Amino acid sequence: MLDLNKRFHFIGIGGVGMSALAFILHDMGATVSGSDTGDSNFMERLLSKGIRVFRKHDPSNLEGVHNVIYSSAISPDNPELAFAKALGLNVMHRAELLKMVMDPYERIGITGTHGKTTTSAMSLKVLMDARLDPSGVIGGDFPYIGGNYRLGRGRFFIAEIDESDGSFLYFSGLRCLVITNIEEEHLEHYGSFEELKEKIRKLAEVCELVIYNADDPNLGEMRLKGVSYGFESGSFRGRILGDRSLFVDGFGRLDLYVAGVHNLSNALGVLALCDCLGIDKGKAMESLSGFKGVKRRMEVLGEAEGIIFMDDYAHHPTEIRAVLLTLRKLYRDKRLVVLFQPHRYSRTARMYKEMADSLRVADWIGITEIYSASEVPIEGISGKLIYETLRVAGIENAYFFPDIEIAKDVLKGELKKEDIFITMGAGDVYKVGRALLVEFKGGCS
């Protein structure tokens, strides 16, 4: 049980998952503080709520603290984390706290390599529009709820369950577990793909109902028990009608505002969830048709001088390809310009060839240096590997930028009318697109 009379301190409070829990505990009446050396979209919101944020990690920040929350992004030798353990404070992983927050509710978890955030946001919106007043935690900034969390009074709590570090095993006994897909990712933690699949299977076995994407070959071969959905196979079937449209057996035609086969699949999974929960089909369809996406998911930032500026969080080859192919279909006659920032040394070392292959969909490809995400650099691993792979393959429109500011300066002279320009990556590359949009507008944000 959570004792809200005890102070909670978050190490790395600006992160999307950490800040969501900080907001929730604050709204529940707890005293919350945190520390973070970086910048994020949520830092200003934390401060506006009166949550104290320290801009460096220091043991002195823990004065009067009872509970210390950390995530897998925090190094074991972090001075606050080490001091908290030595002092005997109650130290919890973020997932453990999320599980405790969710415990009083009927818990719905969304996991998978891709699509977690969009599927979680879609699900939360449908339950809200069905007047079920749900609570939820989203791994992104969802304009429909004004941020990355919602604290309602209904019986459901929807949360994105992170598979990256094995912490999703805290969430046994979920009312529903939705699995969007699974790929060879986060092997630096698991050691092998088989181990990751085994952990997914272990979680599925201790949840009341599993809803999974039968079109995903890896999930299909795992033979999970539950409700399967898909366009090619599954007990809950849909049919693709276009870039934004699908037909669902028992529901009818659904036209989405967001585009792409990946979003059609996300919507199908949400409808399968709604079917299992007994949510009115008409209300579910109407709600999904009005879903306009989460920030940093094929987000249109604006237009200036005939150039459309976009941004996306994609950092895995499958995600990169899905986004670029969708844009290619939507803007057939326009030049597609991408600035990609690799995320993590370990992922780049394992997948730089696949990243290069996915980026080939674009007409002009800029690649920056790697965003480390707190990883220690690996000798010989650089964003330049992706660039070199493209050049060896004969792609002459590829460029490497060791400094992100150099990329911005080059793009300032490269972009022209009718271009579609998108920044891609899970780091800070989004700042380039936003800054360039302001400059092309003549300095008016």
Image: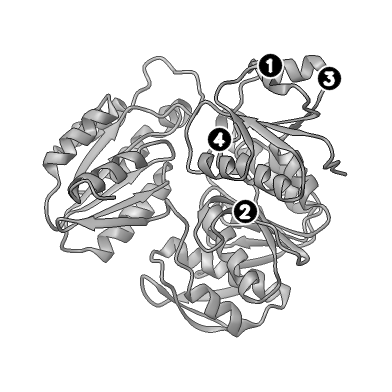
Category of crowding for the residue at label 1, using alpha-carbon neighbours closer than 10 angstroms: few (below 14), some (14–19), many (at least 20): some
Rendered location of residue 347, percent (x, y): 46, 32
Give me the disc on residue 144. none
Rendered location of residue 47, percent (x, y): 57, 40
Q: Is residue 125 left or right of residue 399?
A: right
Query: Is any part of residue 394 visible from this angle?
Result: no
Q: Is residue 232 above or below residue 321?
A: below
Category of crowding for the residue at label 3, using alpha-carbon neighbours closer than 10 angstroms: few (below 14), some (14–19), many (at least 20): few
Q: Which amino acid does label 3 sit on?
A: Gly
| Mark 4 vs mark 2, CA separation in Å | 25 Å
Foreground: disc 1 or disc 4: 1
Element marked by disc 1: helix
Give me the disc on residue 186. 4
Foreground: disc 1 or disc 3: 1
Do the numbered discs 1 and 4 sit on residues whose CB atoms are within 8 Å? Answer: no
Please, which colouring scheme is shown?
A: one colour
Q: Which amino acid does label 2 sit on?
A: Tyr
Element marked by disc 2: strand
Q: Which is nearer the N-term, disc 1 or disc 2?
A: 1
Q: What residue type is labelled 4?
A: His
Q: Is residue 442 left or right of residue 82?
A: left
